[in-house]
Amino acid sequence: MKYQLIIIGGGPAGYTAAETAGKAGLSVLLIERNNLGGVCLNEGCIPTKTLLYSAKTLDSARHAAKYGVVVPESFIDLPKVIARKNKVVRKLVLGIKAKLTNNHVTVLPGEAFIVDSHHVRCADEVFECDNLMVCTGSETIIPPIEGIKSVDYWTHREALNCSQLPSSMVVVGGGVIGMEFAAYFNSLGTKVTVVEMQDEILGGMDKELSSLLRADYAKRGVKFLLNTAVTALAQDEEGITVTYQTGGAEECLVVDKLLMSVGRRPVNQGFGLDNLGLELTERGFPVVDAQMQSSLPGVYICGDLTGFSLLAHTAVREAEVAVHHILGKVDMMSYRAIPGVIYTNPEFAGVGATEESLTTKGIKYKCIKIPMAYSGRFVAENEGVNGFCKVLVADDDTVIGAHVLGNPASEIITLAGMAIEQQLSVYQWMRVVVPHPTVGEIFREALAAL
């Protein structure tokens, strides 16, 4: 059977492309080997944030007295937390299935294999297409540490389904995934140690605010070992022995659990991608243009496989752009304002340039930094809690970066993202009327300070 579009991978890029194309009247086949929603919905973004919200609720109950509310007893019911997480995932997966069905998308479970740019094989049947879109997502990186094969370690999958709280754990990797799980287990009472090879957690995010977030969690009992590499692992009846090297010395500690979270890499093997003979970047990822089309006409690459941004929201926009190109609509992908969010408590979000990236490129800029206490709403809802807002402005007064540490950074960062994407000047953004009192007013306060 022939389709106007075949999509390999049912994650955020894949299901967005399928829905968009189906809604426009294209015949669409979506092939997914696991579950619709991909890693993000089934074992990443959504389940993680569901668990983190339970942890945040527990934190709020513990500190309710600061707001004049007395909670006699607060504790975590871990099986119920996991059950709720599973319920949320099921509900959203069913929602995606319904959208695809309503837009006449054919969903085929199984392993896809690319024969050529117009033919894909699945379950011993070959399907023909006018256009091919590859959205195969990413997988967890497991570093070749000595002894790792003999250790019963966790990845995010196992951590998401933890029904018995470990008393202690080491998180290898202080990136987004590592910090979110460190925050979650710390709130639940686990003694957490984060081991990070770099000199600061959350590489790629604003370094100053990353440092402040680390200091906040250090006060809560999380131990951070920076500039530190895990060199060996072993396991016995006492637990998991983690040997690490820091400052030229080798040390070790014994913990109940080990969580590996050193990063993710695009899935580019096992489904015939090499058969297309695509032009690759120096890093080995398919070259794409502003419409997400590869070097082979009619073949589109979206999501993690581009190697540019392993984020669900980036994948969604890339998929929209690709389908619009197939439909003949004028559109192009912009990476000017891709938000990054860490859903710790407090949240940390940034969009656009960082001071580090601008300095590296030799670009001049102005930086405005103010405490979140400049927002009346923030003060009302965050008793005894500090926060920080930073806005970066180019020499021509165009807003080029914004970074926020404090709740709800994940929600208000969109305001800055829109300003950066539209290349607004300080004065143009200041003309936007912001409701009062809201935490989003913090950006207006920052601009006014400039």
Image (spheres, grey):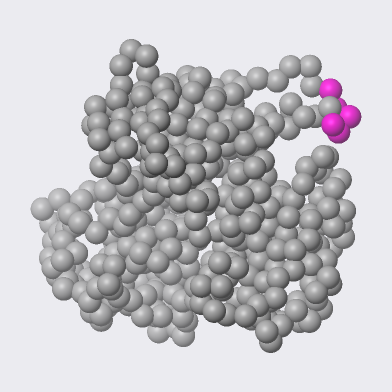
Is residue 177 left or right of 125 when viewed as pictured? right
Give whichever of 79, 204 is nearer the camera.
204
Q: Is residue 423 visible?
A: yes
User: Can the viewer see residue 25?
Assistant: no
Q: Determine if the magenta segment contains residue 67.
A: yes
Residue appearing at x 57%, y 80% in the figure: 363
Residues rendered magenta in the picture: 66-70
Residue visible at 39% across and 49% down?
263
Q: Position of residue 130 (x, y in %)?
A: 24, 75
161 versus 271 height, above or below:
above
Q: Is residue 88 magenta?
A: no
Q: Residue furthest front?
A: 248
Of residues 10 and 198, which is closer to you in this image?
A: 198
Query: Is residue 430 depicted above or below 178 in this figure?
Result: below
Quarter of image, res 328: bottom left
Q: Quadrant of the C terminus?
A: bottom right
In this picture, residue 296 sits left or right of residue 365: left
Residue at x 33%, y 54% (from the top left corner): 265
Furthest-top residue in this view: 237
User: Quarter-wise, where is residue 282 in the image?
Assistant: bottom left
Magenta stretch, main secondary structure, is loop
Q: Is residue 307 above or below residue 52?
A: below
